[in-house]
Each structure stands twice: as structure tokens, then as C-alpha cells.
Amino acid sequence: MKNFYNIKVLLLVCLFATFGFLQSCNDDEEDVNSGQVELLSFGPTGAKHGEKLKFIGHNLNKVESIEFVGASVAKTQFTSQSSDLIELVIPNTAEEGKVTLKVSGGEDVVSKTVLSFEVPVTIASVTAKAKPGTNITVTGNYLNWVDSVQFGTLQDSIVTTFVSKSMTELVLRVPMSAKTGSLTFFTGGTEPMAIETEQSLDVTLPAATAFSPASLKHGENLTITGTDLDLVKEVVFTGVGTAKASSFVSQSATQIVVTVPDNASAGTLKLVAKSGVEVPTTQSITITLPAITSMSPNPVDPGANLTITGTNLDLVKSVNFTGGASVSTFISKTPTQIVLKMPTQDILNGVVTFITTRNYSVATGQTLRINIDRPPYFIYNDALNSEWQLWGGWGKSSEDVANTEQVSRGAKAIKVSFNDAYGAFQLHPNNANVFDGYTTIVLYVRGTVNSRGAIQIKNMSDVTGTDAPFDIVAGQYRRIEVPISALGNITGGIKEFYIKNYGTNPNTFYIDDIELR
């Protein structure tokens, strides 16, 4: 009978193992007769809560209870018990882990393998809105089988440690890197699941409500008041390059005090949350910068003293001039006035630029003209200068830049026949700054009738300048001198140069020797 019993048990173990049972102990015959409780196998693995579980072994009639992780089943709750078999229903609270057979008057038996189940985890509700660093609550079923929760799609926003976890409730802390989005729950068990919520978790972001002061200098402190400002890791200012601050004078949930970077410009700011989300502000700041109201004298001689009047001039470290010259040593400097000696070289007509004590470049928008002795420059002298191009103009029946009919100086002149009372002869300079250093345009003009002409320019901003009219006498050349300053703003250079008919149609001009002085 003894040998037959052992063979029957071994056959049964092999049969159960075929259907997913877990082996736990050996099947040594000596152990059968020792009277000790022995666990050979249990299963099936992957069973669900509420389904039947079988334990196979020796002397199992001595087992008083079976302990699961998270649950205990007393022998009175076994559906059957014999020396070689125990059957029971898996408790809903049982979790993955080893099982322990509690033996009356003997040594407890712990399985050598882990028991796991197929668990249908469900999510019923999730807190709708939360601030990073605070807790949210999840309700559902079998939540104790949730191993981790991912916020959005970021791998660095996965939570594996929970404030509390039970079968029906999960409490976890929102990571600082979390962004608004869905949650994904990753479960354990023999059939792991990834459950993504349909509803998004609204993650709180910082918001600014006021700035103080609204106008300030580089290096001064700006106070930002608002809500949830403790979530801010960086403040980005309007400006060139990396105008931002990531270390603060002070920071709380309602206030940040931050030093304005040296390269910050006027404008709105961005609050960058610890999640990386940028929150633009509706408020803006104004940066106090030096400004010019006047320069005297203007034009100025090289080497002469220049007086610059304006505001916040105490912030100026150096004055840069068009042409490359720079002055950083001043005769005097106050908040409203700078007196300096002009350089003698590398200076041209153009805009003055300030460099502040914080190395911030300020385009003042103010043009300084330089009195420079330069030799005459001919735009036309028997031929068009190679640095200029003849363009189409308008309102002409013909034009000839090598005409020999009526010449004042040299061998050739320009002849333009207009069929429009305000037609134009048009030239284009290859060098936009060709007028720099010159103050006057000189040309000789002869008409077929007494009439009027005009000079006009268009600057590099496509702004047409003021007409500078002149009188034309029929049958004789007349010397015309036009101040360049009368043509309008030529800051940055000129794009077009026009000689215009000015009210008579038809009309013919002879033009000779156009020069700059």
C-alpha cells in the first residue's frame, strides 16, 4: 500500500504541473513517512481571485491555515482538506508572493516559488486637478496590484512609491516633472496591464499677477507676485541670447524676487515650471536705458568736443560712432550730460550707439554728422561713375547719358526728355553710404524752357525724402547746389537718387557734372 500511495501522488503532481501548477518541494519517500507537512505543488498559476486553488503534498491534514500576502484562509474556510490535497477559494485581497502553510504543533511550510494571479484592475476615478508635490487619490478595484503610475508620456514622471495603497484606493504624490495629461497605470500579475485614463489630470502651473517695479535697470531686483510661484525653476526675460534667471533672491508660493539679467530687454516674461512648461506673463517690464535728446555741435569736427544731452547717461560706459570709433573716457559725465572729445579717424555720418555699464548695446536712433574734408566725388563727369547704375525712372520719352548736343564741361552731358510733368531720371548707388562725409550736391542744368527741377532720394528704409527744388533757365547752364541735409533722413544710406521734372510738360533737361562736396 505504501508504494502504491507514493506512485499515485506522483502521478497526480505530474498531472497538475502539466496544467500550470507550481512545484514547491521534493518527493522523497522518507518525508512521506516522517509525519511532517510537505508542499509539493500548488496552482493553477494565473488563477483569478474568487477561483479555486489547490495545494498538493503530504500530511496536509495538519495545516491549520494558509497565509497569502495580504490575506489568510483558515482551515474552516477550505473547500476540502485531506492528507494530500487542500482546496480553497482565492481571497480578493490576496497579493503576489510566497504562501505559508501554518502547521499545528509543527514547523510552518513556506513555498519555494511565488504565487501570482491574473488580476482585472479597474480605475473608477482620479483627482481632477492637482499641484505638483501634492497628493492625488485614485479609486477602483484591485489597486493594490498597481506597480507604477506614469504621468503623461515622460519617463521621468513615473511614480513607483505610493503614500498608501489598498484594494480600492491609491494615494500618490504628483511628481514635480508632471504635466497636464492622462495617467497610465501599470499592473502586476500573470497578465500585466497598462491602463490609460480617458480624462486628463489638470496639473497646476505658476501664474504672475503683478510686477514691481514695472520699470527698472539691469541688475536691479524685480518682485513677481502671483500664485504657485514655488513651482518656477526659471524666469525668462525678453532679450537677445539667454536672458534668463534660474537662481532667485527669494522664492515662495506667492512671490519671487529675481535680479534682472544684463541682457534683458523691455517686454513680457516667461515663467518656466519645474516640468519645463513655459507660462507667458501678460505683465511686462520696462528697462531703464540711456537716451539722447540732443548733440551739440552737429555736425561736429573730428577732434572737437561733443556735448550729448539726455537721460540716464550715467549708465553709459562707452559711446560708439558709425565707422568703428569708440570713446570710453569722458571729459565729464552726469545723468543728463556727457562731454567727450571726438575721435579723429574711423568716424562717419551715422547713428550713435551706447554701451552701458552692464554691456548692453543701446541704439539711440540719433544721427551725428561729421565735418570731414574730402575731395569732390563725381557721380557723373562725361560718363556715369562705375559705382552707380542707370535705372528706369519714369515719365521720360528718352534719355542719353553720352549726349554731345549741349555740353557745359568736358565733352558729354546727360539729356533727358520728359513727357510727364513730374517724371524722374533715376540713378542707383552700389554703395549706400556714398553721401557720408559730404554736405552738398553740385550739378549744372540747362533747360529748353524756363522751368523747375528737383532732387529727391529714397533711403534704405524705402522712405522717399523731401524734394529739393531748383530753377532752370532756358538756353543756358546754371550751377545748382543742394544741401544733402535738405533731402531728408539718410541714416543707413540711400537706395535711389532722382533728378525730377517739376511741373512742366513736355520738357528737356541737359545735366552736366553731378558731384558731391
Image: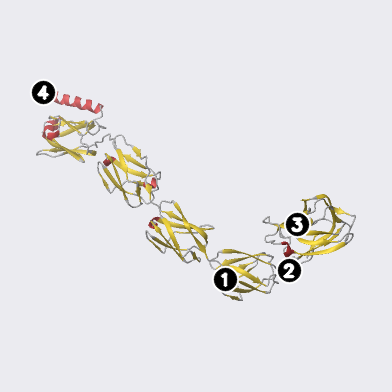
The local crowd at label 1, few if under 14, some if 14 to 19, many if 20 or more residues have their Cα within 10 Å, is many
Q: Earlier in the sequence, mark 4 or mark 2?
A: 4
Q: Which residue is mark 1?
A: 313
What residue type is disc 3 on?
A: Phe
The quadrant the N terminus occupies is top left
Q: Is residue 409 above or below residue 108?
A: below
Instruction: State the residue in front, 146 or 170.
Output: 170
Q: Residue at x 14, y 23 (%)?
A: 4
Q: Earlier in the sequence, mark 4 or mark 1?
A: 4
What residue type is disc 2 on?
A: Ile
Give the foreground label among 4 and 2. 2
Q: Is residue 282 above or below residue 22?
A: below
* Image coordinates for residue 342, horizontal then vertical, percent: 66, 72
* Image coordinates for residue 130, horizontal then vertical, percent: 35, 50
Give the foreground label among 3 and 2. 3
Q: Which residue is mark 2?
A: 372
Give the foreground label among 4 and 1. 1
Label number found at residue 142:
none
Q: Image check: 464 left or right of 450?
A: left
Q: Earlier in the sequence, mark 3 or mark 2?
A: 2
Query: In which image quadrant can residue 210 be found?
Result: bottom left
Instruction: State the residue in front, 144 or 136.
Output: 136
Secondary structure category for the residue under label 4: loop
Q: Which residue is mark 4?
A: 1
Callouts 4 and 2 close, C-beta under 8 Å? no
